[in-house]
Amino acid sequence: MRLCAAEIDSIASLGGSNSPTESHGVSFEKPCGGSYLSPFWYVWLPTEDSAKTVAKRSLLIKSFLEVWGEGATWEELLASIQAYPRERIQQWCMPHISFKILVDGWGRAVKQEQQIDIINKFDFLGLQGPIKMQTPDLTLRVIIADPADNNGLPKVPYRIYFGRDVACSDRSVIHKYGLPRRQYLGPTSMDTEMAFLMCNQGQVKKGDFVYDPFVGTGSILVAASHYGAHTFGADIDIRIIRDGKVNKAGKRTDVWDNFRDYDLMSPVGLMRADAHRPPFRANLQDIFDAIICDPPYGVRAGGKKSVAKSHKITCAETHIPSTDAYTFEECLKDLLHLAAKHLKLGGRLVFFLPSVPGVDKAVKTTAHPMLAMVANCEQPLTTRYSRRLITLQKVQPYNAELEQLALSSEQSLRPPTKSIHEVVYESQSKAQESGGASHLQRYRGKLV
C-alpha cells in the first residue's frame, strides 16, 4: 500500500506546492481490521475532481468508491446505508439518471443467481432511472471481501462494502507500451508499469525536462515522453546508444525506434556520458524538472565508470572507452550531487535503492541539505533482497560547501547493504546461518 499511497499523493499534488511535507488535502486510513496488506483503504481527497484526476493517471489503484455503507453482515450493511445522509443518495434517484449495480467478489466468486439476489436487496434505495449497462450515469458497486480459503490472498476480515463509483483507473498504457511490443530491449529494460510509476512519483507533466543518466534502452524516457516531457538521456556504454542491435528479422534497431513506434517526441539528445564525471559545464545549474533512473547495483548489471588507459586510439568511430568498477555507494553520491546541482527548485529525483528485507527503511536512506525525502517504498523481489523506490525533492538552492559538509558526515546517504550481489547469490544455507531468512510472506506468488 505504501507505493500506492505515494503515487496518489504525488499525482494529487502535481502542479501544486513545492513543499514535500504539505499534505495537499490527501489523507489515508487503514480499513476494518487494520491490516496493512488489505486492498481496501479509506482515502480523503479535496474534491471529486481530484479523485478523477488521480484515477485517470494512477497505475496502482483500481477505483475510488464513495462508501455509502459497510458491514460484517448484510443486516449491518443495510443499516449502515440507512444511516448514510439521505440527501447524498437522493440526488442520484432522479428519473433521468441511468444506473447499474455491480457485484464484485474479492477472495471468492459470486455466481450469477447470487448477484441477482444481492442486487434486489437494494430496492429500498428508490432508484427511478433506467438501467443502463453501458456508460450509465451512476454505477453502484457491492464488494464482498471474503478470503476465507485464503486463495493466496492476505488475511482480512469478512466485509461487505457498498457505494458509488467515483472514478476507475485506466491501465491501458501498460498494454500499449508493454515490453513485448518494443523493438529494442536489453536485459535491464525497466518494466513498463514501474517506469510509469516512477514518472508519477517524479510528477512528470507536459513541457518538463526529464533526464535519465542510466538511460539504457530508454524505457523510463518513453514513459516520460508519453506525459509530454522533453527527455534527455546518457549511458556509459556507447554501443547501446550508437549501435543498437539486429533483430530476428535482420533489421537494425535502436533506442530511437522505441519512440518512433509509439509516435512519441524523440529525446532532445542521447549521449555517451559517465555518471561519475557529468558532462555539464561547471556553472550550469537548475536545468531539469526531474531526474528519474534505475542505477546499476550489481545484480543483473554492475556499475561502470570511465578510467584513463595508456593506449593509442586507432579508430575514433569504433573506439570503446575503458571503464572500471563503479560501486553503488559512489554512484549514490554522484546521483545526489547531480540532483542537488541540476534539478530546478521543487524538482524530483526518483531512483531505486537496493535493500534487504527487514532492514529498517529509515537507515541512512537520505541525508542531503538540498534534498528532502518525499517517499521511501519497498518493493520485495525475493526472500533475499528487495529494492526501495526513493523519491527526493529539491527544497533549497545548491550550495557546494553545505553539500561537502553533509557528504563527509556520518549522516550521508548510504545503501542499506554494501554488496547486494553477495546477498543475492549467497547459498541458501549461508543465508539462513546469517539470519537472512525473510520475514516476508508469499501471497499468490508475490512477496509482501
Image: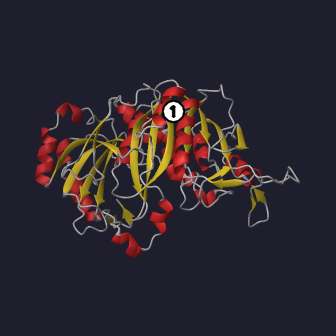
Instruction: Give the camera-side residue of 239 and 195.
Output: 239
Instruction: Give the camera-side residue of 220 and 313.
Output: 313
Instruction: Give the camera-side residue of 138 and 349.
Output: 349
Image position of 151 (left or right of 54): left
Instruction: Give the camera-side residue of 417 and 391.
Output: 417
From the image, which quarter does the C terminus lie in?
A: bottom left
Tell me where residue 82 appears, x and y as whole percent. 13, 41
Residue at 34 percent of width and 71 percent of height: 432
Image position of 149 (left or right of 15): left
Q: Which residue is mark 1?
A: 404
Residue furthest to the right: 314
The number of discs equals: 1
Residue at 33 percent of width and 37 percent of height: 97
Using a 10 Å C-alpha cutoff, classify the residue at mark 1 as few (fewer than 14 neighbours), some (14 to 19) or many (20 or more).
Answer: few
Q: Amino acid at mark 1?
A: Gln
Q: Is residue 361 above or below residue 302?
A: above
Image position of 12 (left or right of 341): left
Residue furthest to the bottom: 429
Tell me where residue 337 appears, x and y as whole percent. 55, 36
Tell me where residue 154 appears, x and y as whole percent. 28, 61
Rendering colour mode: secondary structure
Image position of 72 (left or right of 313): left
- Circle 1 SS class: helix
Whether residue 272 can be seen here: yes
Q: Is residue 81 above or below residue 107?
A: above
Quarter of the view holding residue 409 = top left
Tell me where residue 290 appears, x and y as whole percent. 55, 35
Whether residue 61 can be seen here: no
